[in-house]
Image (cartoon, grey):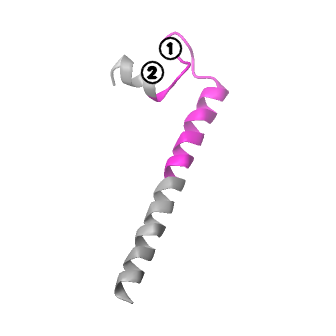
Amino acid sequence: MNKQLWKAVNPGTNSKDKPNMKHLFYKQHAASRHFAIERYFLKELHWDQLKKKS
């Protein structure tokens, strides 16, 4: 993973920093947000499918 991308994914960190709890929490939060968005879209798609069938 290149440094530019790493900085984009992990704002406020540089290679010298050891990942602290805040950093880990941020990553966790970003992941959970991602899954929530995925679930939302899956649900929406599912409803679209049901509407088309009826």
Q: Are marks 1 and 2 in contact (CB under 8 Å)?
A: yes
20 over 52 or under it: above or below: above
Which residue is denoted by mark 1 in the rendering?
Answer: 14
Residue 22 falls inside the magenta stretch: yes
Q: Where is 50 relative to 24, above or below?
A: below
Circle number at residue 37: none
- Residue drawn at x 33%, y 20% is 2
Q: In which quadrant of the rendered image does the C terminus lie? A: bottom left
Numbered label tally = 2
* Residue 47 quadrant: bottom left
Q: Position of residue 1 (x, y in %)?
A: 33, 25
Q: Nearer the viewer, mark 1 or mark 2?
A: 2
| Disc 2 element | helix
Going from the N terminus, do you reach mark 1 or mark 2 first? Answer: 2
Residue 25 spot, x, y in % from top left: 63, 35
| Residue where numbered disc 2 is placed | 7
Characterize the local packing of mark 1: few (<14), some (14-19) or many (20 or more) Cα atoms within 10 angstroms.
few
Q: CA distance from mark 1 to mark 2?
A: 7 Å
Name the amino acid, label 1: Asn
Q: Is residue 11 magenta?
A: yes
Kindly identify the residue that appears in the image at 60 percent across and 27 percent down.
Answer: 23
Answer few, some or many: residues within 10 Å of disc 2's Cα (few below 14, many 20 plus, some between 14 and 19).
few
Question: For the magenta stretch, what is the residue range?
Answer: 9-35
Task: Tell me which amino acid carries mark 2.
Answer: Lys
Residue 3 falls in image quadrant: top left
* Residue reaching furthest to the top: 16
**Is 49 located above or below residue 42 in the figure?**
below
Above or below residue 38? Residue 47 is below
Expressed as whole percent of the image width and height from the top left, the position of residue 18 reads: 57, 17
